[in-house]
Every structure is written in structure tokens, then in C-alpha cells.
Image (tube, helix red, strand yellow):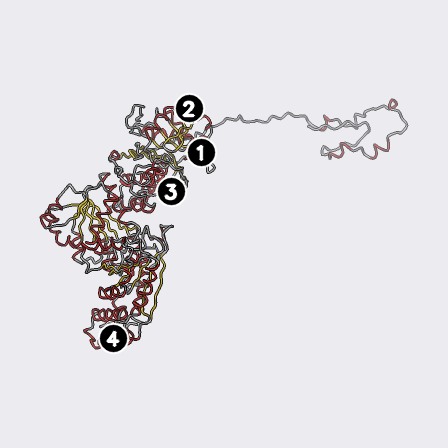
Amino acid sequence: MVWFPQRSQPATPRSTTAQPSDLVSPTPATRSSAPTTTSGSDLVASIDAASSWHLDDVFATELCSLEIPAIEPIAIPIRVPPLRTKVKGFLFPNANRPFVPPAVGNLADPSEEKKRPKRDNKQASRGRIKPPSDMVKLQDRLFYMLQPPLESLVGSGQLNFPFNPFPYQLDGMAFLFPRYAGILADEMGLGKTMQAISTIRLLLCSGEVSNVLLVCPKPLVTNWLREFSVWAPEIPIAAIEGNSAKREFQWRSPQIPVKVANYELLMRDHTILEEHDLHFDLVALDEAQRIKNRTSTTAEVIRSIKRTRSWALTGTPVENCPDDLVGIFEFLSPGYLKPGMPMHQIAKHASDFILRRTKDMVLDDMPPKLYRDAELDLTPEQWSTYEAAESEGVVHLENLEQSLTIQHVFELVLRLKQICNFDPVTGSSCKLERLVADIEEVAASGKKAIVFSQWVKSLDKIKAALQPYGPLEYHGKIPHKKRNGVIDQFKNDPNSHVILMSYGAGSVGLNLQFCEYVFLFDRWWNPAIEDQAINRAHRLGAAGAVTVTKMMAVNTIEQRINDVLDQKREMFDTLFSNHEQPTRNVGLNRDEIFGLFDLRAPCGKKVA
Amino acid sequence: MADSSPENKNPTLGYLTVVNDEFTGWTGGMLVLDRGGRPIEFQCTLPVRPTKAHEILFGPTLRSHLISEVIGKLLIQKCRTPLSIVCTDLADAMEIEAFTQAPVILVREAIENEDGSIDVKGADELEAVPFAGATFLAPIDVASKVESFAGRFGDLPDAVEPFERIREAIKEAHSQLARQQSGAA
């Protein structure tokens, strides 16, 4: 409803659609008619009803009602189900078994055992046991995963060692502990023996195994017995030896939880194992590359041993080609790897079974290994003999034509390498001249050196030239019984500055970390064997930097072989460095051997 | 549910924690250890995934509800081994004391920040008890009971590390669950 002010003067009736401005602004007529001198009391207002309008005439008063519907809320239920879950439980029946072995004498830092260093929350615990990927059942996997890390057991004094293990060694034990098939392939000198012994000790004490067979090369049997007496003195152990009756008794004896046998002996005694249906909870092979050739008798006999767990220890799981690894896997998990598999596939499949660490990876305080390539020119006498031998030899090989075999090539290689060592006519040797000068310096500084050669005859000649420096010998012609005495004398005799070793006898299992110099008088076919030899000196506890001198006669067969060895190193790196990309096969194949003399392989094309 | 009494000859520690994963949900685990830190029993819940409605309606109380009343309570109930002490690294889990007779404590080293401080409401009312190289924060009324057990766990290698084991085990269980689901699909 709208109200208009009542007017005192006549006005034209207006429409009801008056503008708002009309309501507030006086019209000009109104303004001019207003007397300026008249007082308010003189004014008389009269209304002409006929010509006026009234509000009631304009607007018809009407009452309107608006219907407003009542608000009726509707409840929409939102169901919130109670949060519920289910539980899966696992009881570990073996939990009450003693897990850690009893304390033994000669504990490492007993004064520090009771101290609990402040915990570093950021650092992950070392030695945490992780189940292998082929273990499927969740309960089994959790049993291992929920075990306390070995590092914490060592730290609390529950688990004792005669010497404090390195953290990577605890990792190695944690790797082996749950595995039914595994390769510990640490580089030489990182303590594979100790890791294996300590894990066997844990397995025996926790009741996981009760009957263990260790197989190693014959010269290393005493080494294993010695290491066991250090790291697991409470575990009864015996080497299988003696006459047939004694050996049979030993094999069958349940009183000896750990038996040590050498590969050669097993060739004879495997019938005893078969006849008595002997079974082992664990068979561990040291220097497992011995079974790399899966068709060899050794490999077949080893594989025939009945066992639950299979471990392989080797610093050189691959020596020549990736198929070496296939041979070892035939022992661990037959058929898992196939011969001829591409290298990257082998690397991928095998990765969960292999633990390999190098010194560079795990040891910050390991002394450096310094390589010196002594590239020497043959003496004139050697050159003369060498050139004649090579040209005659190659002509001979070419004349053989279809009857040429790889053996013929090997014979020529060996002959030429021997000439590179010593001239067979005059005995002249560029290498010996250099070696004598170097050993003189080694002896003058009170140090010790190892000299490696492929041939005992070469070692004999070297020995004669090095007499002033008290040379000792350790090779195939030294009886096994005398070998430990040789090592002891070399270690303790201040006048003995050099030991002469063959690659075969001296490349594995020996601890000569007091030597700071290694000389490779000639080169082996395989870099892995050379590395094993070098690592006799470059290992844990090494006195200082180890200098390795590799002697090589330039522009000879030695240099050509060296190039192939470099390629083999590349192959090894590919297999064990988790590379995803396939790489070319760089093994020393048949054609490459013929290629050393630029020869044409029979029934094949000429290879450069 | 199996509860313990102080006379228990083989005292045990129950480690309880809950993991929240964006994709999986909330999963709880309880690991029961003997005096040497070896596992006796492990209980693990299936993941719980609260809905949006739960999040809205429970608001800030959802976390505490899940940890103590849903997961913690169930783990305690299902545990078959008598427990001497329940250890946790979650302040919200302290409320499970309503469901067990065993003292429930917070392991200080597992909850402290890098500078050694802790952000736990009411921490001032907890008493610090040295225990196997760590510090257990126990409600005052049970502190003496916890203290009486400390001497019996002298061989425990590490009083903090077991939480890592539970988390690893939960991760393992999740991955196996995922494998089963992908296999079924």
C-alpha cells in the first residue's frame, strides 16, 4: 500500500503511476503562488470535494493472504557401519629353541659388551634376516623377518664372536641363514669362510640343521678345521680321512655334526654315501667353481649327495663364460638356469641366489691395491728365439689344415709364453732381471713378496736368482704335509723375503696378508685366478697397500692374451653388477683362441 | 585374550603399532617377544579403510578410534600369549589400557623428534623408566610395575627396533595380499 501526501491546492487528478520524484519535489506553480508576506494564521484551506481526489478513491484497499507451506524436515539416514577388521595370527613353535650359541672364550671386546650405545634411529639395523624369494608361505617368511637383526644380538652380548665381525659379514650371515640354495660370492679376502662357519653355528644352535657336510679342495681342509676352531670352537668337527674302514665309520657317525671332505676323496667315497643312504641337512661347497663343468665327474658326484640345503662359496662363480654359473646352479637348484641363456637373463634369474661384495663396496679402511704394469722388452736372445718359434709354429699350424685342433694352438701359446719367461738356450730373461732388482728393494725395506708363475721350472730358475733373499717354495711339487710349515716359516723368518708360488697351489685359501708385494711373473688365462692369487696378500688384516706387479713382454703373445683378459673382466662385471641391459658375450671362445695367431679355424671363416 | 600376572616366569613384551597407508588403509600389528627379543607370536590385522562418512562424522577422533578401539583392542583380544607389558610408539594407542591388564607404555626413542623432543599430549604425566637401553614412558600408576620388569629383560637386544620388524612384516603381508588379489583377478 502506498501513501501520497494530501494537497491544499487544486490539482489535476493524477494517475496512480506517479513517479517517486513527484512525491518529494514541489512543483514550480506551487513555489510561485506561495505569498511571501502572509503569516501562517491567515491561511485558510478549503477542499473542493468535487474536483479533489482522495486516497481511497485511487486505491482499492484489499487484503491479500499468502499461503506458506509448513516446513516438514525429512530425515535421510546415512549409515556409518562400525569400523571392523580381522586378525591373522602366527605362532612360532620354534621360538623356544635356543637361537644364539653359547658364549665361547676369547670374546671380542668383552668390556664393551654390556655397554648399550645410544641408538641411531636413522640407521637401519645390519644383519636383518630376509627370506629368499622362493620361500612362499607367509608364516615361513615372517618367521625369518621377525627375528632380531644379528647386529643387535652382537651389540647386546647375546651373540658372541672371537672377533667383532664387520657389518657386511653380518649381512652375509643373514643372507645364508634362511637360504636352502645360495651362493656367497664375495671377493677373495672378505671372509667367506668365517661367514659360512658362523651361519652354520647359528643353524646348528637353533636346531635348523644337525648334519653338515663341507666340501673343499684338499689343501684347504686344514684351513677349515683351523677356522672352525676359531669361530665355532664348541662345534664338533672332523675331516674325513684315513683308510676305507675309518672313513666309512666317520661318514656314518652321528656324533660329528660337521664333516669336512675334499673333492678328490668324494670321488672315492660317494659309493659309501649311496650305500648307507646318507643325507645331510646342509652341503656347503668351498671353491665351488670346481663344479662349473656340469658334465664333469666331480659335478655329478657332488650333485648326487642327498641334502636339504645347498650352499656354494666361491670368489669366482664365473671363470670363463656365463655357463660356469649354470654348472653351479645345477647343484643349487637343478634346471633353474639353462646353458646358453643370454647373460642378462642369467644375471636377472640368479640375482636372488647370489650375494657378492667386493672390497671396494664394503671396506672403507681396506688398504689400496696398486697395479704396476711392467711392460718389458724381451732380451735380444729371447727375441731371436721367440720370433723363430712363432713363425715356425704358425707355419706348422697352417700346414695341419683340417687336422688343426685347439690343443695345437695351446701348445704353441705355452711354448711362446715360456720363452717370454726365459730363453731356453741362454737362460736370458728380461723379467728375471727386473724381478731381482725389485725383490732387492723389497728385502731392503724389510718387506715380503709373493711371486706367482704358471710353471714350476720357471720358479726353480727364479729361486736360484733370488737366493740372497731366502726364497721359499709353495707349489705342486711341495708335499701337502710340508706346506703349512712353509707358510709358517715364511711368516716368521725375518730372512725369508719371498715365496714362490704356482697359481694352482697358491691361489686359494691362504692368508698371506703380511705381504705387501705380489709379482705375477707370467699371466694366467683367467683373470679370476689372477685375482685369487693377488688376494692372498690383499685381504682383511693386510699390513698396508698391496702393490701388484704384472710382468708382460710387449708385442708378444702375452700382450694379446692380456687384451682378452681385459674383455673377460668386463663380462664378470656385467653378470654381477645388476646391469639390466644385455651386453655382448666377451668370453674367450674357440675362434678367439685361433685368432691369437690370426689363424683360420677349421671349417670356419678366418678370424682376426 | 591372554593377560599376564607379575608372577609370570617367562615375561613377554607385546609390541603394538599401526601403519596408515594411503592406498591400503590402516593396518595394525602386534609382535610378542621373549626376553631375548625372539618372536613368539605375531598378530596382524587386515587393512581398515574408513569411508568419507567416517572421516566426517568421527572428525579428529577418527585416528584415535581406529588405533585404540578398532585395531588395538582386537589385537589385544586375539593375542594368545600372556603379556607382561604392551609397548607402543603411538600416543593414541595408550588408550588400549582399557582392554588389557598389562601396563601399556610408550617407547620414547620411537616417538621422539630429531632434537629429542616429543609431541605427545599428556607426556608430562608419564614416568620415564629405563628399560633395556631405551626409555619407557609409563603412566604413573603402573610405572613401578614396569620398573620391576626392567631387570628381567636385560638380554633384550634393542627395545626400539621391534617396531621396524612389525612394519616390515606388515609390508610383507600387504605385498602377499596384493599378489593373491592380482592372481585371483
Secondary structure type for disc 3: loop
Secondary structure type for disc 4: helix
| Nearer-N-terminus badge (1/2) | 1
Chain holding disc 2: B
| Nearer-N-terminus badge (3/4) | 3
Q: Quadrant of the C terminus of chain A?
A: bottom left
User: Mark 2 highlights which residue?
Assistant: B140
Does A391 sit above or below residue A236? Answer: below
**Relative to the observer, which residue lies in front, A395 or A233?**
A233
Chain holding disc 1: B
Measured in 3D between alpha carbons, the distance from the residue under mark 4 to the one under mark 2, in whole angstroms, is 94 Å
Q: Are marks 3 and 1 in contact (CB under 8 Å)?
A: no
Residue A124: mark:
3
Chain holding disc 3: A
Three-letter residue code for mark 3: Ala
How packed mark 4 is, by other alpha carbons closer than 10 Å (few <14, some 14-19, many 20 or more), is some
Measured in 3D between alpha carbons, the distance from the residue under mark 3 to the one under mark 4, in whole angstroms, is 62 Å
Residue B55: mark:
1
Measured in 3D between alpha carbons, the distance from the residue under mark 3 to the one under mark 1, in whole angstroms, is 34 Å
